[in-house]
Amino acid sequence: MSQTVIRLRGKRNSVRNLKACKEDVQPPTKHEVLVKVHAVSLNYRDIAIATSQYPFPVKENVIPCSDAAGTIATVGDGVKGLAVGDRVICAFDTSNIFGDSDLLNGQGGPVDGVLCEYIAVPAAAVVKVPEDSPQSFSEWSTLVCAGVTAWNALYGAIPLKPGQVVLCQGTGGVSICGLILAKAAGAITIVTSSSDEKLELVKSTFGADFGINYKKHPEWSKEVLKITNGEGVEYVLENGGSGTVKESISSVKIGGNVSVIGFLSPTSQAEMPDVAHLALERGAVIRGVHFGSAQLLQDLVRFVGRKRLRLPVEKEFAFSEGDVIKAFEYLQSGAHIGKVCIKVVD
């Protein structure tokens, strides 16, 4: 049986190097399942890989993307607890069942990813989603990377408590997933953006309590301190990297948590802030977050399923070479709020 696969061909200098081709479907081994992919969620990581900005190893001519939701088409002879037809999502790193990831096995980077019609994965890396859930396959796919990263930031080390304050940088997938999860857990939320229009939309659609325009307030930590009566926040989901980490650390209360997730706003070495001094000054816990294990993903699916949370899919594209390129370009433009997805099965 053949399938359509999209690979990143040639030099990794443009999303336009994404090319569709036909390849054989690889049958699952004894302890694997074959997943029929219904939806794929895009991440900034996918743009970074396509444009040689990703700081970790990437396979040549890789099948991109890490986030898939679908149904089980075939079950290996040694697999128990899973059946044909089960609705599932696959962990970002199929070798990372619990504990920390080493970033050397993440799908769509060092190994082939999920931008295809079928994928064989270890059964232990598959998480079933509720059969009666209101969420679409596209919604469930957003949990694999953005969702579990936000969950890891809030629960992976020091668990979030109701009434605490969470600051989410920007209006991309991780931030909006973090906002939704934090609100559902009873936290107070602050979102930053360069657009007043986006801030109003995030408040009205996702229930953000406060918004800060960082273009109008470059030293936005001062606005955070005003909102929190001088105390600061318990959690920051830090997406900017070296260009924003100073403001993030300045925003946390004494003993607060800064989860370093992305590198959207890098700065020169000469302008790098003194992170050690800032961390000591605030007594801050600064932690790099590498997505999340299958175990964390299972915890997240349970939370989202029981609370029946709707997940932030802003726009969906068809599964063709041209439409996939359009999806990547739309994500690259930064115009989105939440997640951009590809519907592999219409």
Image (tube, rainbow, N blue to C red):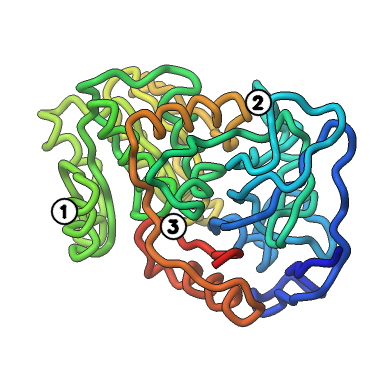
SS category of the residue bearing label 3 = strand
Q: Earlier in the sequence, mark 1 or mark 3?
A: 1
Q: Nearer the viewer, mark 3 or mark 2?
A: 3
Residue 263 screen position, x and y as percent: 52, 51
Amino acid under disc 3? Lys
- Cβ atoms at labels 1 and 3 below 8 Å apart: no
What residue sits 65% from the left and 50% below the top?
Answer: 66
What residue sits 65% from the left and 26% below the top?
Answer: 100
Which of 139 and 104 lies nearest the eye of the viewer?
A: 139
- Cβ atoms at labels 3 and 2 below 8 Å apart: no
Write down the quadrant of residue 103 in the picture. top right
Q: Is residue 170 left or right of residue 173?
A: left
What residue sits 64% from the left and 77% below the top?
Answer: 320
Residue 69 screen position, x and y as percent: 58, 49
Write down the residue under mark 1.
Answer: 204
Q: Quadrant of the C terminus?
A: bottom right
Mark 3 nearby-residue class (10 Å; few <14, some 14–19, many ≥20): many
Write down the residue under mark 3.
Answer: 339
Residue 52 vs 211, above or below: the answer is below
Per the model, the C-alpha gap separating discs 2 and 1 is: 36 Å
Write down the quadrant of residue 60 in the picture. bottom right
Q: Earlier in the sequence, mark 2 or mark 1?
A: 2
Mark 1 nearby-residue class (10 Å; few <14, some 14–19, many ≥20): few
Per the model, the C-alpha gap separating discs 1 and 3 is: 17 Å
Q: Earlier in the sequence, mark 3 or mark 2?
A: 2
What residue sits 72% from the left and 33% below the top?
Answer: 102
Q: Nearer the viewer, mark 2 or mark 1?
A: 1
Q: Is residue 306 left or right of residue 323?
A: left
SS category of the residue bearing label 2 = loop
Per the model, the C-alpha gap separating discs 3 and 2 is: 25 Å
Write down the residue under mark 2.
Answer: 100
Amino acid under disc 2? Asp
